[in-house]
Amino acid sequence: NNKLFLSYTAYIIITGISIFVAENKPEALITYAKYITYFLTFTVFWIFSKFSKINLTDLFFKLILISIVIESSSVVFSVYDAIIVNGAEFYRSNDYRGLSANINITAFSLVLKSPVVVFYLFNSNKRLITVLCYFILFMTSSALFFLLTRGAFLAFIIIILSLFTYMLIRNSRANYKKVLVCLVVFFTSYSFTNTIMGSNESNVVIDRVSTLRLNNEDESINQRLRYYSAAIMSIKKNPVLGVGVGNWKFISIKYDSKKISEYTVPYYVHNDFLQIGAETGILGMLFYIAFMFTPLLIVLKKIYLSKETFFEITLLAILSVCIIDSLLNFPVGRPISHVLLIFLIVLFNEVNLNHKTKK
């Protein structure tokens, strides 16, 4: 009888029904098998949260800390090995993707986990933990500078500044000092990465970020806008069950055939909500939106009533990055991102229920 569980279950059921309208049913079955795996993972996490005596919050946050150290280190050391050790020239390359499939996935994965580092930084008075958090922030920001993913840059700046602002409003001297040190850490990582990049005549980071503008010169942004428009047209034509799960990669060719170059087929809309709407219909899209946005609305309501905790603010920050990623990319197709979202939703539900029980 839980709204979050029912929303995700309804979304999975509608996704399964959409197989019947799919032109390519084998592909629909293959994609649906992946979504069933997500659902079973979600169910296992849910049952684990109900019956296990392990502190789920502590486990989740510590796993994230370990993960972000490994991911950021793999990026930084791969760049260091290529540029400093082997003398290669720096350019934005998938060779620095770390442990995931490409640099954009790695960048958003790091941003997703960064609020947890800030949570430990401001919630601990132990010097060792504080220094460790500064080091992790240094590695994370350095990795992001090397990856040069503009959407991740934007999400990271918004989330970190929001968390800092929230802590400064609390008016603690210790908070002011920690924020100041964090700014020094970010500036140091910027100088460190810029030195390794060897950008003497121009600044690689600033040059990359400055290209973030809506005009005919930015192919990446214009490409996304084309995909969004095509998905909306597809939803209008097939509002009930869409074109079938996993079938957007075939239908998209009809919409983008005049723009396709070098046989690059638009596999994804680069917007999970629009892709789910195109593949499963409006109802499937609404259930998925309810699954992702219900926790967001609950925390925002608590903030409005001044009943929130910093832990809930941290969860809100992670969820906000998930939503930004879903609006710009395709995390539902990437286990490294979607499984984290599933765990986050389960954790939020458990914390919210415990709060209600105590109250």
Image (tube, helix red, strand yellow):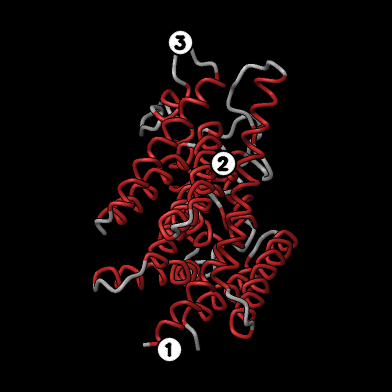
Task: Note whether 307 is above or below 143 in the view shown.
Answer: below
Residue 184 point in image, percent of width and height: 40, 35
Whether pointer 2 and pointer 3 mark residues with C-beta atoms closer than 8 Å, the reply is: no
Q: Nearer the viewer, mark 3 or mark 1?
A: 1
**Element marked by disc 2:** helix
Q: Alpha-carbon neighbours of circle 1 within 10 Å: few (<14), some, or many (≥20)?
A: few
Q: Circle 3 is placed at which residue position?
A: 201
Asked if residue 233 shows in the view, the reply is no
Mark closer to the chain start, 3 or 1: 3
Q: What is the CA distance from the residue labelled 2 to the residue labelled 3?
A: 26 Å
- Please tell me which residue is depicted at 53% across the width and 42% down the height of the picture: 135
Question: Up-down: is 44 above or below 98?
Answer: below
Return the residue at label 1. 357
Callout 3 amino acid:
Glu
181 displayed left or right of 335: left
Closest to the observer, 36 or 144: 144
Residue at (54%, 78%) from the top-left corner? 10
Percent position of residue 200, x then y: 48, 11
Give the residue displayed 53% in from the left and 51% down from the top. 128
- Amino acid found under the numbered disc labelled 2: Asn
Residue 337 left/right relative to 190 = right
Label 2 sits on residue: 104
Crowding near the residue tagged with mark 3, few <14, some 14–19, many ≥20 C-alpha atoms within 10 Å: few
Q: CA distance from mark 3 to mark 1?
A: 61 Å
Q: Can residue 74 be seen in this snapshot?
A: yes
Q: Of residues 86 and 121, which is closer to you in this image?
A: 121
Q: Earlier in the sequence, mark 1 or mark 2?
A: 2
